[in-house]
Amino acid sequence: FRSGNIARKAVAMTKGSNAEGSPSSRAAVQKRHRIAKVATGVIVASQLAAVAASSAPVLKDCIPSALGFFANIRTPAALLAGTALGQLFAPFVLADDFRDDISSCTALRVRTLFYSCMLSTIALELIVVFFATASTNRLLGSGYNPMAPDTLSFLMKYFEFPYVSIRLQFLTGLLTFTMGLGIKAYAMFASVPDLARGSLLILAAAAFEMVAYFDHTLVNFDDYWELLVRFFT
């Protein structure tokens, strides 16, 4: 508004001097013209600055949302690790028909595969809990700019490894837990073949659905496998 008033006054002064036709000095007329040009330049500059400000990304403090991300994923990871720990020491009873149809060596391999899945789940989810807790503590310090267009950009700039590790290992732990449950369900319900196959298919469908939606939520990566490659590189 102020620059607009200046421009209008300058134009009015110029018009007044031209309309009067008074014998005012040429220097005064040129001065008024210069004032009008400066005022016009101020208006143009202010408009350009307004356009640049509107197109620039709005920065916000990402610390609260980053803390929320680490806290939200830490809780389900701890619950999943505790559930897998209970499954690790729960009895694994094979169905009679299944035990009769397979050798003792095969039965041992089935149990080994189930316990390996549970151990993998515990290890992966404990890593998630640790990384989330350590990253939360790091957020309390300094050494980074908390202002960013969004929380994901902030995490990818300052906490890329914890972010990639947490997202990858949380889903991988879910998948190994689901795989272990499928193995146990099939072995325990083998005396009822339809129930055994149905349980296995339901858990397999759940795993594929989790992976599909996980890929959909990724922004900086195309899919689970690209995230895995980034984790190791």
Image: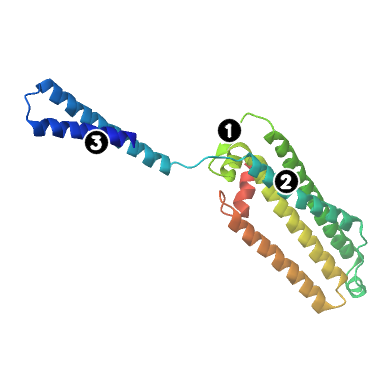
**Amino acid marked by disc 2:** Ala
Left or right: 44 as drawn, with respect to 192: left
Q: Which corner quadrant of the image does residue 22 belong to?
A: top left
Q: Secondary structure at mark 3?
A: helix
Q: Earlier in the sequence, mark 3 or mark 2?
A: 3
Q: Earlier in the sequence, mark 1 or mark 2?
A: 2
Q: Secondary structure at mark 2?
A: helix
Q: Marks 1 and 2, Cα distance to the nearest angstrom?
A: 21 Å
**Amino acid marked by disc 1:** Asn
Give the color scheme: rainbow, by chain, secondary structure or one colour: rainbow
Q: Residue at x 59, y 58 (%)?
A: 216
**Amino acid marked by disc 3:** Arg
Q: Please report contact status of discs 3 and 2: CB closer than 8 Å, yes or no.
A: no
Left or right: 163 as drawn, with respect to 183: left
Local crowd at mark 2 within 10 Å, few (<14), some, or many (≥20)? some
Local crowd at mark 3 within 10 Å, few (<14), some, or many (≥20)? some
Q: In the drawing, what numbered circle is on residue 8?
A: 3
Q: Which corner quadrant of the image does residue 201 belong to?
A: bottom right
Label 1 belongs to which residue?
145
133 in relation to 191, above or below:
above
Q: Marks 3 and 1, Cα distance to the nearest angstrom?
A: 43 Å
Q: Return the x and y of residue 85 as percentages of the image width and height.
A: 86, 53
123 in relation to 142, above or below:
below
Q: Secondary structure at mark 1?
A: loop
Q: Residue at x 62, y 53 (%)?
A: 225
Is residue 74 visible from the viewing direction of this image?
yes
Label 2 belongs to which residue?
71
Q: Return the x and y of residue 120 as percentages of the image width and height.
A: 79, 51
Q: Earlier in the sequence, mark 3 or mark 1?
A: 3
Q: Which is closer to the viewer, label 3 or label 1?
A: 3
Q: Return the x and y of residue 224 as percentages of the image width and height.
A: 63, 54
Query: Total label count?
Result: 3
